[in-house]
């Protein structure tokens, strides 16, 4: 008796776990990523808890990475408000798209935020929620992103970002926190540490 041929399903390559993709991105470009692991959901929730999203019209997220802050942020965006993300790293942009297929993502530098807004017909933004690693950036990059932010945030609009204690000790971090942020914004403050994050992080509000 001849046996029916056994059908072997083709082996599908599973997408890498987000943490693995993130670590891979860090090992390839440490200065662009600035952390070895994605933020915790506790930090994500704290950031979103500190936003006043009532009546907002336009919110951008910079450097969403694999999309952990976005997990908390996107569901909190009110109906009628436009949300989009800007991610420069192609591997992380791909991971973000897989995790948040319905969200708008621009694979571009945050330094180009004015042009990104213009392309969408957006005059100004209420909030920029940022995961950018300011403490790893050169002065030129810090300044060019801050200049661009100034052109898009509405008066009273906020850049909400986070940082780590050791980041404030690094020359680039000190420059961002002590010199540049106070120069570019009318009010800057930090909230309590989120300990359930690796490393513990503070949330920083910079009001235009
Ligand atoms: C510290 S990781 C934060 C990732 C994620 N938000 C989180 O909290 O897990 C920094 C992110 O900023 C992105 N990034 C770095 N420079 C950027 C730039 N100029 N424009 C947009 N994204 C950038 C990196 O690729 C990375 O995804």
Image (cartoon, rainbow, N blue to C red):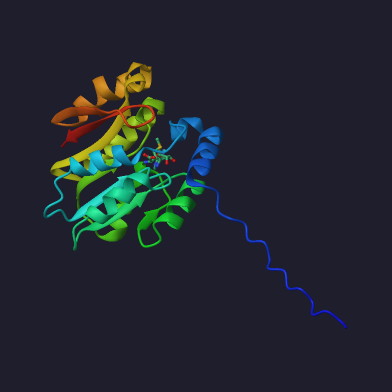
Query: Total number of numbered labels?
Result: 0
What percent of the width, then of the height, locates residue 141?
38, 32
Identify the residue shown where x is 31% and y is 47%. Answer: 61
Q: Nearer the viewer, residue 203 or 104?
A: 203
| Residue in front for this viewpoint, 106 or 184 | 106
The residue positioned 19% from the left and 50% from the top of the image is 124
Query: How far across and down, in percent of the image, does residue 175 sit?
Result: 31, 20
Image quadrant where residue 181 sits: top left
In this view, the residue in front, 38 or 82, is 38
Residue that sits furthest to the bottom in the current view: 1
Viewer-side residue, 198 vs 93 = 198
Q: Quadrant of the C terminus?
A: top left
| Left or right of residue 181, residue 23 in this image | right
Q: What residue lies at 12% left-to-right and 52% top-to-bottom?
A: 54
Quadrant position of the N terminus in the picture: bottom right
The quadrant holding residue 99 is: bottom left
Query: Visible in this render: residue 2?
Result: yes
Left or right: residue 150 versus residue 107 is: left
> Going by the image, does 207 lie left or right of 201?
left
Task: Specify the farthest residue to the right.
Answer: 1
């Amino acid at each position: 008796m001849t046996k029916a041929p056994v059908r072997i399903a083709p082996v599908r390559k599973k997408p890498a776990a987000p943490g693995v993709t993130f670590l891979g991105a860090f090992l390839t470009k440490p200065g662009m990523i600035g952390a070895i692991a994605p933020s915790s959901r506790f930090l994500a929730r704290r950031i979103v808890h500190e936003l006043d999203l009532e009546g907002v019209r336009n919110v951008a997220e910079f450097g969403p990475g694999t999309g952990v802050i976005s997990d908390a942020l996107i569901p909190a965006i009110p109906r009628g408000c436009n949300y989009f993300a800007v991610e420069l790293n192609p591997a992380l942009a791909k991971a973000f798209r897989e995790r948040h297929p319905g969200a708008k993502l621009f694979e571009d530098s945050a330094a180009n935020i004015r042009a990104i807004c213009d392309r969408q017909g957006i005059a100004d933004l209420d909030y920029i929620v940022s995961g950018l690693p300011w403490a790893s950036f050169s002065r030129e990059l810090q300044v060019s992103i801050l200049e661009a932010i100034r052109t898009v945030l509405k008066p009273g609009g906020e850049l909400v970002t986070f940082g780590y204690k050791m980041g404030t000790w690094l020359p680039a971090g000190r420059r961002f926190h002590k010199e540049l942020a106070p120069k570019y914004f009318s009010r800057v403050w930090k909230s309590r540490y989120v300990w359930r994050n690796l490393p513990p992080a503070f949330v920083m509000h910079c009001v235009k």
